[in-house]
Amino acid sequence: MTMNPRVADVMTRYAVAVRRGASFKDMAARLSRFRVSAFPVVDDDGTVIGVVSETDMLTRQAVDLAREELDGEHARDEPREPDGLTAADLMSSPAVTITPDESVEHAARLMYNCRVRRLPVVDADGRLIGIISRTDVLAAFDRTDEEISEDIGQVISREFGYDPRQFTVTVRSGVVTLQGSPDTARLGRDIVHKIRHVQGVVAVRDRLSYQPDQTAR
């Protein structure tokens, strides 16, 4: 694995996908069969037009069943199926996607910011060519939170001349929470910027504090 892996280096090239007309039953069967929590929805050309997750399906089914009970259309002991629902009805659109030449770090940050566990990988025309999951990302980094924290301490000491003990650095699953009081707001922003580029960092929660006269500096 390269030091700065790309999405193409770690993605799964076989991606489970459905067409916009796929039925609820078909999608449920695919979720179970392939043991995935979501999959892309593609048009006839293979272009990604959305994503359906198990959460989308469960939420819609719960809403429909609640409506049925309120309307009294079905007895409680009758089996009720979400007939008629298709991938087009349930999908989140537009889909959050990534290209194979993007860095794995960028993929990790995109997953974190968009609160998704996997990203469809698309070519220049938006066609599906693979999938990258959170597991793929973590395997690519192959770094412990302790190693990341140690690197952050070195960045603070070597590049900024600060004693790392002046800051509280917490790392959990690559997400860094930084607390402390830099001399100026500009210095604080520079430190956060550098930390974002430490290998394995997914996101930085800036919890730095300043004196009132430091915020404009």
Image (cartoon, helix red, strand yellow):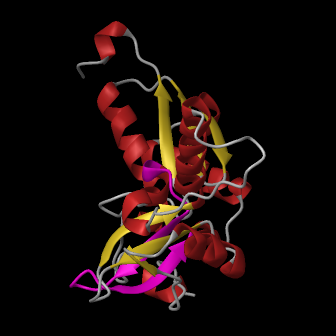
- Pick out the residue farthest to the right: 77
User: Measured along the vertical axis of the image, is residue 196 above or below residue 183?
Assistant: below
Q: Point out the image quarter for the C terminus.
A: top left
Decide which of 133, 202 is in the foreground and name it: 133
Image position, residue 179 (x, y; %):
55, 29
The answer to whether residue 55 shows anywhere in this view is: yes
Decide which of 127, 87 is in the foreground and name it: 87
Q: Point out the image quarter for the N terminus.
A: bottom right
User: Tag count in the figure?
Assistant: 0
What's drawn in magenta, residue-wise? 113-133
Question: In which image quadrant can residue 30 be found?
Answer: bottom right
**Which residue is pictured at 36% across the width and 65% down the height?**
88
Magenta stretch: residue 125 in it?
A: yes
User: Measured along the vertical axis of the image, is residue 42 above or below residue 175?
Assistant: below
User: Measured along the vertical axis of the image, is residue 37 above or below residue 16?
Assistant: above
Magenta stretch: residue 59 in it?
A: no
**Which residue is pictured at 67% across the width and 81% down the height?**
34
Decide which of 204, 17 is in the foreground and name it: 17
Left or right, 79 with reference to 167? right
The answer to whether residue 104 shows anywhere in this view is: no
Image position, residue 118 (x, y; %):
52, 67
Left or right, 92 with reference to 15? left
- Pick out the residue farthest to the top: 212
Question: In which image quadrant can residue 169 be found?
Answer: top right
Image position, residue 75 (x, y; %):
70, 41
